[in-house]
């Protein structure tokens, strides 16, 4: 089931709406004698009302732990210089480990660059590899379409 909300109070109403939709979905599945599937909610305008902001802020502060687990093999800083993708591999302490470069005008440049990093065992976590791959693909796209690239930012 997919439900579309034009406007959705994600702090107050969304949990109740999602519960009610799931309940409806279960009833429909039971009557049709089928297995219940996933529930997806899409909100065009998701918001928190002003009167709920203090409570929401308290919850955020109480749960303000790092959502990701840093890769013990370090991090990568990706830049574009002309038609070249440049990747600096940094240790967890921020020290330079290696630098990788790839001409982004060759076919599959991001994949070639990613393969070099994988061959050097630069990544130990799947999540990190997925993010690096996405960033490299964006850098390649930026070069091919003459766009400005900044890591973790939309292409301009």
Image (cartoon, helix red, strand yellow):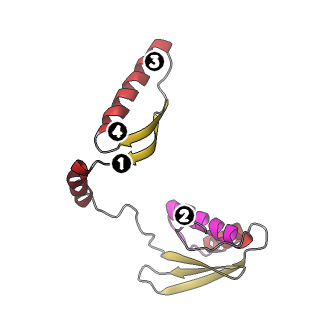
| Mark 3 vs mark 1, CA separation in Å | 29 Å
Q: Count every numbered label the image shows and give the total.
A: 4
Q: Which quarter of the figure is the C terminus placed in? A: bottom right
Q: Which mark is residue 14?
A: 4
Q: Which mark is residue 47?
A: 1
Q: Which residue is mark 3?
A: 28
| Mark 4 vs mark 2, CA separation in Å | 29 Å
Q: Position of residue 108 (x, y in %)?
A: 75, 66
> Circle 2 — which element?
helix
Give the residue drawn at x 31%, y 48%.
48
Sequence-wise first label, 2 or 3: 3
| Mark 4 vs mark 1, CA separation in Å | 10 Å
144 lies above or below 39: below
- CB of mark 2 within 8 Å of CB of mark 3? no
* Residue 22 as seen in the image, left or right of residue 63: right
Evaluate whether residue 10 shows in this view: yes
Sequence-wise first label, 2 or 1: 1
Specify few, some or many for label 3: CA neighbours under 10 Å numbering under 14, 14-19, or 20 or more. Answer: some
Nearer to us of marks 2 and 3 is: 3
> Circle 4 — which element?
helix
Sequence-wise first label, 4 or 2: 4
Q: Position of residue 92 (x, y in %)?
A: 43, 79
- CB of mark 3 within 8 Å of CB of mark 1? no
């Amino acid at each position: 089931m997919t439900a579309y909300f034009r406007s959705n109070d994600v702090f107050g109403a969304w949990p109740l709406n999602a519960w009610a939709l799931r309940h409806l979905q279960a009833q429909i599945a039971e009557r049709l004698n089928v297995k219940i599937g996933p529930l997806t909610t899409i909100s065009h305008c998701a918001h928190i009302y002003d009167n709920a902001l203090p409570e929401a802020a308290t919850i955020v502060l109480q749960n303000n732990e790092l959502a990701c687990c840093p890769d013990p093999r370090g991090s990568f800083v990706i830049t574009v210089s002309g038609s070249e993708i440049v990747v600096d591999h940094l240790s967890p302490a921020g020290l330079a480990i290696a630098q990788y470069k790839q001409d982004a005008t060759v076919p599959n440049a991001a994949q070639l660059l990613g393969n070099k990093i994988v061959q050097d065992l630069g990544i130990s976590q799947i999540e990190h590899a997925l993010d690096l791959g996405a960033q490299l693909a964006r850098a390649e796209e930026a070069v091919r379409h003459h766009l400005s690239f900044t890591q973790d930012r939309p292409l301009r």
